[in-house]
Amino acid sequence: MQKGLAFVDLARQQERIRIDLNKRIQKVLEHGQYILGPEIEELEMALARFVGVKHCVSVSSGTDALLIAMLGLGIQPNDEVLTTPFTFFATGEMIELFGARASFADIEKKTFNLDPALLEDKITKKTKAIVPVSLYGQCADFDKISKIANDHGIPVIEDAAQSFGALYKGKRSCSLSLVSCTSFFPSKPLGGYGDSGACFTNDDALALRMQEIRNHGQEKRYYHTRLGINGRMDTLQAAILLAKLPILEEELRLREVIGAKLTSALKEHCGDKIGLPFIESFNVSAYAQYTITVANREQVQKALAGFGIPTAVHYPMPLTLQPVFNKYGWKVGDYPVSEWASQNVLSLPMHPYLTDTEINFIADSVRKSLTT
C-alpha cells in the first residue's frame, strides 16, 4: 500500500468527465460570455430540478449566498440572526458584516447540528431569521426547527454548504426552508474548480430580489432598484458544474456506501476508542466530510500524517470564542457541546472513489495512531 492518500481526490473524478469537461470549457472560450453566459441559466434550471424547487440563483460563493439571502429577506442592521456556533466562520461573518448581530444556540452532540430543543429560549423580539447549518453533509432537523420558527413568524435559511445532495425525510437539502444556500467550493459534494455557490427558493419575489442583489441591485442594465454586490457565478464555473452534475447522484450513492464501510471498518479496528458519525434514521448524508471524535487529536493527527493519511479539523474553535466576537463577552463554558466538539473532531479522507483497500488502510492506521 503506497502512502499519501488524497483527502478529496478530484483527479479520479476528473478522469471520468474529462471529455465533456473539456468540451464545455472550450464552448465558453469560443462564445466568450464569461459573465452570465448561457451556461448560467442552464445550470440554474438543472440545479433547481435536482433540488425540487422553482428557483436557483447562482452566485460567486457559498459565503456570498448567505449574504444575498439575508439581504433578500430584508434583514437590517441591529436585527438578530440565530445560528450555531459550531460552523465555518462565514455563517457568522455574513450576519455581522452588514450590521446585524449573530446569536447562538448550542448543537446536538450526536449530529453536531443545531439543537432544536435550545432554540426557543434564544429567540428574542430582535430575531429575524434562523440559520441551521447542515454540517458534515447531514441535514439539521428542519421539521422541529421550522415549527419553532413558524410559531414566531421567523424565516429559516438553510446553510447547506456541506449538504448539497443530502436527503431529509426524502426531500433534498436546499428544499427544506424558505431560502437555502450552498457552496460549490472544489471539495464539496458538487464542487467547481474555484469559488461558486447558489441560493434556492420557491418564492418568486425573493428569487427576483436575490438575482438583482447578486448583480449590483440592477433591475435592468444601469438601473439600480436596491443595493447589491458583485456576486455573480463565473460562466466557466457553471460549465464545470454542468459537466459534473450527470454523475452527482451516483457519487452521492458511493459516498453513502463508503461512509458506511468506513464506519464498519473503524468500529472493527478501533471499537469504542473513537466516536463515529451518527446519521439520523430519516437522513441520508452527503458525507461532505467523514468526521470522528478522538480524545487525543494532535497525537492521532501526527501519527496519521506519518502513515500518509491527511486529516483536517472542521472546526477548531466555535464562533463564540473567535477574537472578532470578543465584544459580545461570550466565554468558555457558554456553549459546552460546541466547545467539546471543537476540541475532539477530526475529519478523515472522504470521496466517492475510495477503494476497499484504502478504507481498510485508513481504519487500521487510525487504530495504530491511537497507541502511537
Image: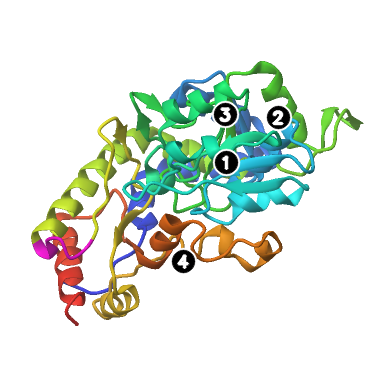
Which residue is at the front of the view, 1 or 37?
1
The residue sitting at the front extreme is 121
Q: Is residue 115 visible?
A: yes
Q: How far apart are labels 1 and 3 at the CA level?
A: 26 Å
Which residue is at the front of the view, 105 or 261?
105
Mark before the other along the chain sequence, 1 or 3: 1
Magenta segment, which residues? 269-274
Mark before the other along the chain sequence, 3 or 4: 3
Mark before the other along the chain sequence, 1 or 4: 1
Residue flagged by tag 1: what amino acid is it? Lys
Tag 2 and tag 1, C-beta contact below 8 Å:
no
Determine which quarter of the picture holds residue 77.
top right
Which residue is at the front of the view, 80 or 198?
80
Residue flagged by tag 2: what amino acid is it? Leu
Q: Nearer the viewer, mark 2 or mark 3?
A: 2
Q: Residues within 10 Å of mark 2 (few under 14, many from 20)?
A: some
Q: Residues within 10 Å of mark 1 (few under 14, many from 20)?
A: few
The residue sitting at the right extreme is 223
Circle 1 sits on which residue?
122
Name the quarter where the C terminus is drawn: bottom left
Q: Which mark is residue 200?
A: 3
Which residue is at the front of the view, 226 or 157?
157
Q: How far apart are labels 2 and 4 at the CA level?
A: 31 Å
Q: Is residue 233 visible?
A: no
Q: Which mark is residue 316?
A: 4
Position of residue 71 measured from the top left corner of the image (x, y, whole percent): 74, 36
